[in-house]
Amino acid sequence: MGTVTPLPLGRPGQVGFDRLELTRILDLYGRMVAAGHWRDYAMSFDNDAAVFAAFRRAAERPEFRIEKRPALRNRQGMWALVGEGGMILKRGQELGPVLAPVERRLMKLVEE
């Protein structure tokens, strides 16, 4: 018959989000879109980091960036929430606590 050649899913050593992480991030993104706050997103995958950026409008800088840097796992934590100005707002070992400031902001948006 023939031989089956596996397709490369990414570059060797490329950092990415696993299914549970991406589900959690996209769930938050969907709720922010439903609240009318975010309109667009972008993802970037490099050898040292995977980044999810959320935008209010497509033509400006991202309001938040969620970064996964496995090299910092044993130091400050591999997850970081970066604000619009580039300042790190929250850093941690797990994704949930890092997303907490954005989720609290979502609660304020819904209440208003």
Image (spheres, rainbow, N blue to C red):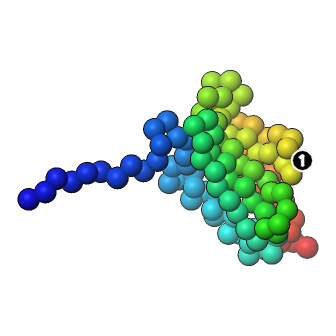
Percent coordinates x, y for residue 38 in the rendering: 78, 68
Drawn side of residue 71 relative to residue 104, left or right: left
Q: Residue at x 39, y 49 (%)?
A: 8
Q: Residue furthest front?
A: 2
Percent coordinates x, y for residue 69 in the rendering: 64, 36
Q: Is residue 83 above or below residue 23?
A: above
Q: Residue at x 30, y 51 (%)?
A: 6
The image quadrant of residue 70 is top right
Drawn side of residue 87 relative to residue 25, left or right: right
Percent coordinates x, y for residue 48 in the rendering: 61, 35
73 or 100, which lies in front?
73
> Dot 1: within a 10 Å radius of its alpha carbon, few (fewer than 14), some, or many (20 or more) residues?
few
Q: Residue at x 70, y 63 (%)?
A: 41
SS state under label 1: loop
Q: Residue furthest top?
A: 75
4 or 21, which lies in front?
4
The image quadrant of residue 60 is bottom right
The residue that label 1 is drawn on is 85
